[in-house]
Each structure stands twice: as C-alpha cells, then as structure tokens.
Amino acid sequence: MGQRRVMVPVEQVDLSTVKYEQESIQAPHLTGFLFRFFVRVVETPLIGPSIISILKKSNKIDELLRNTVIPEEPMFKPEYPPQEKEPGVVILDEDGRPEDRVEAALNCLPHYDPAACWGSSSLPFRYWKIRDYAYAYRSGKVTPSMVAENIISVIEEISAKKPREPLLISFDAEEVRRQASASTHRFEAGNPLSILDGIFMAIKDDIDCYPHPSKGATTWMHEVRSVKTDAVCVSRLRGCGVIFVGKANMHELGMGTTGNNPNYGTTRNPHAPDRYTGGSSSGPAAIVASGLCSAALGTDGGGSVRIPSSLCGVVGLKTTYGRTDMKGSLCDSGTVEIIGPIASTVEDVMLVYAAMLGSSLATKIRMRPSPPCLPNLLSYDDSNTLGSLRLGKYTPWFNDVHSTEISDKCEDALNLLSKYHGCETIEIVVPELHEMRTAHVVSIGSECIASLNPDCLDGKGTKLTYDTRTSVALFRSFTAGDYVAAQCLRRRLMYYHMEIFKKVDVIVTPTTGMTAPKIPPSALKSGETDIPVTGYLMRFVITANLLGFPAITIPIGYDKEGLPIGLQLIGRPWGEATILRLASAVEKLCGEMKKKPVQYYDVLRAN
C-alpha cells in the first residue's frame, strides 16, 4: 500500500516548481572475467530476472512505469501540429531527382574559392570538402581512381593491425576500383552525375549497400537476412555518383554508445587511439574524422550519429523522424531511429542530406511532413534570419557534465552567436528528464527485442557479444504495460517541448556530457558494461530520438587533453533548415583552429 502515484495532467503542471535532478545511474562497471560471469548469471532463470529487477528498482524504472498513473493517452509514434515555413530557405522536391536536389543545395552555399583551398601547404589544417574533390576532378589534378588507390592502401594497412581496430567490416578493393573507374570515365567524358560524383562514402553496417552483406556488426545476421539491393537512401546517393568504400564498423546491433566491438575489433578515435570513438556509428564517424571519406551514413536511435560525431570532432545530422526513408536498414520498423549523414563540415552534410532525403509513402500519409528545405546561405537576409533566432537553454541540464570544460566551451559558442549575430539565449525549463530517459530505453529496447526474438529463440542469442546480451536481458524484462506507459510519457513530453518551441526556435545543449572515454584494455576481448559512462554520453541526445526532432552536432573546440567537444542544436519538427543555418554560423565562429587528428590521411594531396 502507499506506492501508487498519480501524475498531474501535463497542462496543469506548474513549471516554476520543477527542480532539476542530476542523473545518478546505479549499475556496476564490469570488464573481463567478471563481466562474462555477470552476463551468464543474468541469463540464468530465476536469478537473472531478480538481478535485473533490483537494478530497475534502484533506478526507479518500475516505480515510474508500474506504480504511476499517467493521465495522457499513448503516442506510439511522433505526432506534430502543422509547422510554419522557415524563413530564408530553398524548398527541395523530395519526389524529384536526387541530382536536382543536390544542385539546389549547391546553389545555397557560399562562393567557392579554389585559390583559398589549394594555395600554400602551410595553411592551417582543414578537412578537404566535397567541393575540393569536385574541383580537383574537374581541373584534372586527380581522378577518382587515383584517390581510390590511396584509400585502398590505407584501409589495407589499417586492416593488418594487431589488435584489430578496423574502420570497415566489409571491404572489397575491386568493387571500389570498379566504382571509381566508372566515375573517372564520366569525368573524362565531361558528364559527371552531380557534385557528389567521385565522392567516397562509408555506410554503417546496419544499412544495406549492395553487394555487401548487412551484419549489424554481428557474426551471424547475414546468414538470416540477405541483401539484394541498396537501401533507399543509398540508392539515391549512388544515383548521384557516390563511391561506396564498404560497410563501416559499429557497436553490435547499435546497442551501445562507445563503439566497442569484440567481434571485429574496436574502431579507435582518430584524435586519441587509446579512446573510444563513441557509438553506435563508430566506423562512420572515425572514417570521416581520419580524412579517408568525405562523408558517411549512420543510424541514430539514441544519439548514434551525434555521439561519435561529437567525440571525433565532425558534424552529424539527425533528421526529423520520417524525413528519410528507412527501407533497407536493420532498424526500419522502429519509432525512434533515423538514417543520417556524417561529414567534416556543415556544407557537406547539406549536400549529402539533399541527395538522400525523402519520406516513405506511409510517412507522407500519416505524418504530413512539411516540405524539406535548406537554408540559403548566399542570401543577404541570412544574417537577419540568424539574428532573429531564439536559443533555449536549460542551465542546470546544460551544466550537468563530467567536466566544466564542456559546458564552458558550449557557453562560449552561445556568446559568440550573440556577439556576432545577435542571437538571443532564453532560459527554459525542460521537465521530467528522468521520465524521458525511461520512456526512451523502454521504447527502443522493446522494439529491438521484438525484431530480435525470432533469431534469439533460434539459437543466435548466444552468439551476441556480452554487452549486447546484457541489453537483451534488460529489454526482455519490459512488459506490454511498460511499453504503453512509455508511450503515454512520450505524449506528455511532446506537449512540454511543443510549448517550449512556442518561445524559442532551437534548444541548445552540449552534445555529450563527457569527451571520448578511454578504452580499458580488458574490454577489447569481451566488451564491457559501464552504464554511468553511457549516461554521460546519452545525457542530451535522447530528446530528439523519443520525440523525433531534428538535431545536429558541430565541433566547437577541444578539452585540455585535445579531445573534441560538440554543441548540439535541437530544432522544431521538420526544422532541419534552421539548425543547419545556425550550425553553419557556429562552424564559422568556432572552427577556425581545427586540430589535425593523430590518425589522419590526406588521400587527395597524396598524389
């Protein structure tokens, strides 16, 4: 008796009484033998469920989901009211040709000056952009085939390392040469398909890219699921002339935030090889940060594009839920996941995003998305549009980080936006963040286990890595009632955020609560479970997943150890153009002194 709790209807909550509660996750950090032993105990009937129950109770999960009356009805997928058109934008035809959308995106970018990019080799470090490659190809400095040989050489060198630390899980040098040769011939004939022709990209291993298998970084997924064609977004990029180098490494089945992978080897952070890249899109972020590819595709169900992009010092875009067609990915039936681009610059993200966007027919019917737009960065009104933006900051949340270096750098970026563009920062309150975290883990976990159950019952579950098996044990403990309660919380949280977006245009946070964590040597063989680290890495990202909002991370500097720090911008539903515009401004203000990663390969100038 006395455990029952009733939540106040969301419209009646007095925000002045909301107090921020620092996240405190109760769970052990385990690696090596102790971790393997723990997993076997957790999987034991009777004992295992009891341990999971204790962990859930100590983190108040059962109290929220089973002892609480939530007055709101469930929202099983994000639902949005109609949105006003964003100012200063170019509307893209999502049903038109991807090449035409890319051309429209190109016309939104500032003037390109080859002399500024190809001048003295003593210029400060900068990543080669897609337009640099395009200029090099068109001017005859190099060909896609020449660049391909440089990339192949590096990938083969990395693949030979011991212990393994691969960027790619699936790689076929002859397939890369074939694509590069076709692109080279198009340039020789004067008929490149688009500005993306000859641009090298990697595809995360949970997105189909024919003829490669999609394993999701498991050892067995390709045995039960064959790949016969490209995913929709990959097909659109291929039609623009993109060259795919292979399938990028990842945290197994996306069930982790570090990128640890005992199956194939753990990808290392190019800025500090003794540290994690972040996950689950570890390979895509690292291959971009190392200079080998201009861009990559990842999936993001719980920060899996933004976390590794932030830790590796590159740009990662999570689009609005439903903005991109998920067909042809392992997570195409969930309610929190998207496929998003990773690149070294905002303009390259814009070009890739323009090519790959386009909702499925079912999404168009159900969600009625606003037309996709890009910011016109050439417009004289761009500064005026920037100056009118209101930035929402929840200070206690913003400052809840492992090191104040992170929040200080992010605060510096906001001050620069105010100084040079007149952006106003407004204090906001984001209620029920613990409820947000709980609703997210129950949603993504329940949806994941629903898709995995047939294979696990068929004996494949024991072939998963130990940390994936730990997640599976937790996810199996969720009931149908837990899932429905989480969806009631989703509606409640959506109300709070739509009210916030009546006052501000963008919500600003650090991307992660810590910089890249060190890799324990004992975790390389069997993995690890470190939920407090996961909490820091996911602290600010899950809002955009549970509620489907667009979000982007931009590198803004480094901590005292030289590790990248990212700023996250969360936009209104369908508001990609606004966050891209603001991200471009942040990039110009904070990106002048980029550090060359320790592991960086100049595959363009190598010739």
Image (tube, rainbow, N blue to C red):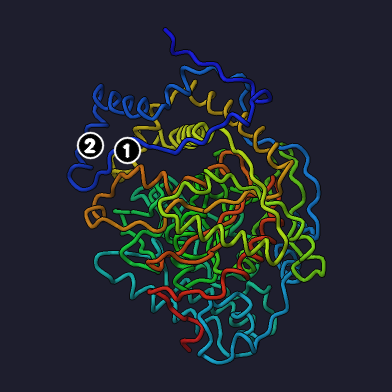
Q: Position of residue 267 (x, y in %)?
A: 36, 62
Q: Which residue is mark 1?
A: 470
Q: Position of residue 255 (x, y in %)?
A: 41, 45
Could you give the CA–CA distance between mark 1 and mark 2, rounded to whole angstroms?
A: 9 Å
Q: Secondary structure at mark 2?
A: helix
Residue 227, visible in the rendered structure: no
Q: Residue at (54%, 62%) from the top-left corner?
A: 342
Rendering coords of residue 136 (x, y %): 60, 85
Q: Which residue is mark 2?
A: 38
In the rendered image of this protein, does residue 498 appear above or below residue 208? above
Q: Position of residue 422 (x, y in %)?
A: 73, 61
- On-image quarter of the N terminus: top left
Q: Is residue 408 above or below residue 447?
A: below
* Residue farthest along the bottom direction in this orientation: 120
Q: Is residue 377 at least partly visible in the picture?
A: yes
In the image, taking residue 335 as reference, residue 56 lies left or right, namely left
* Tags 1 and 2 touching, CB below 8 Å: yes
Query: Vertically, is 365 above or below 290?
Result: above
* Residue count near mark 1 (Cα–Cα under 10 Å), binned few <14, some 14–19, many ≥20: many
The amino acid type, in three-letter code, at marker 1 is Thr
- The kind of residue on which mark 2 rests is Phe
Does residue 459 appear to the left or right of 131 in the view shown? left
Q: Quadrant of residue 238?
A: bottom right
- Crowdedness near tag 2: few (<14), some (14–19) or many (≥20) residues, C-alpha within 10 Å: some
Between 561 and 109, the one nearer to me in the picture: 561
